[in-house]
Amino acid sequence: MNTLIRQAVSVVQPRRTFLGRTGLLLSGTAIALLSGREALAAKADKAAESDLRILNTALGAELEAIAAYQVGAESGLLQKPVLDLAMTFQGHHKQHADLLAATIGKLGGRAVSAKDKYSFPVDTLKNQVDVLRFAAGLEKGAVSAYLGAIPLFGNRDLAKAAGSILGDEAMHWAVLRQAVGDVAVPGAFVS
């Protein structure tokens, strides 16, 4: 009988030792998972901060575009229907700015404000074509900026929204180019 008890004890003790070690492994695994979660959370925080910086940069550019169209409208150089078109495009930029500011707020950020004064080359704007070429240059810059920003977004929904705005900016650029007699779409790719 003693032999049977000794055999049973010899089987039970390794199981207890194994279970104890497994418990330690599980605790170690749990700790590793928790620290991995913390690392993921830190990475997500950095991505969110980066997204907010990108959104604020885009908002700043939209606010500048609103001001530029206002300068064009007040210059007295734009005639109907070009003036109406400029005001329509300014309205689009206002909508972009409103959406960007609201998104920044929803993400817990603080939206940038319009500058008190922008440095536009008003002394070089002598006629309607000059104003339209200036506006086209701003729109091309906006297209390039959104194109560069899209792959940087951590949040893919923000990237899609930026892509939508990029499309609108590209249409503005094409219409303005055509209005001054340039080829509306100068190439197969935007750079």
Image (tube, rainbow, N blue to C red):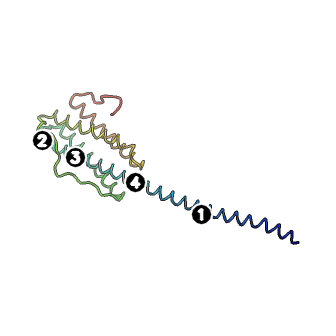
Decide: marks 4, 1 in contact (CB < 8 A)?
A: no
Q: Residue 38 appears at what percent x and percent y?
A: 48, 59
Which is in the foreground here, disc 3 or disc 1?
1
In this view, the residue farthest toward the bottom is 2
Mark 2: which amino acid?
A: Ser
Q: Relative to the observer, which residue lies in front, 18 or 44?
A: 18
Which quadrant holds residue 41? bottom left
Q: CA distance from mark 2 to mark 4?
A: 43 Å
Q: Element under label 4?
A: helix
Location of mark 2 (residue): 75
Decide: marks 2, 4 in contact (CB < 8 A)?
A: no
Decide: marks 3, 2 in contact (CB < 8 A)?
A: no
Q: Which mark is residue 46?
A: 4
Disc 3 packing (10 Å; few <14; some 14–19; many ≥20): many
The vertical placement of 128 against 149, above or below, is: above
Residue name at image x 30 percent, y 54 percent = 101
Q: Which mark is residue 27?
A: 1
N-term-proximal mark, 3 vs 1: 1
Q: Residue 14 appears at what percent x and percent y?
A: 74, 64
Which is in the foreground here, disc 1 or disc 2?
1
N-term-proximal mark, 3 vs 2: 3
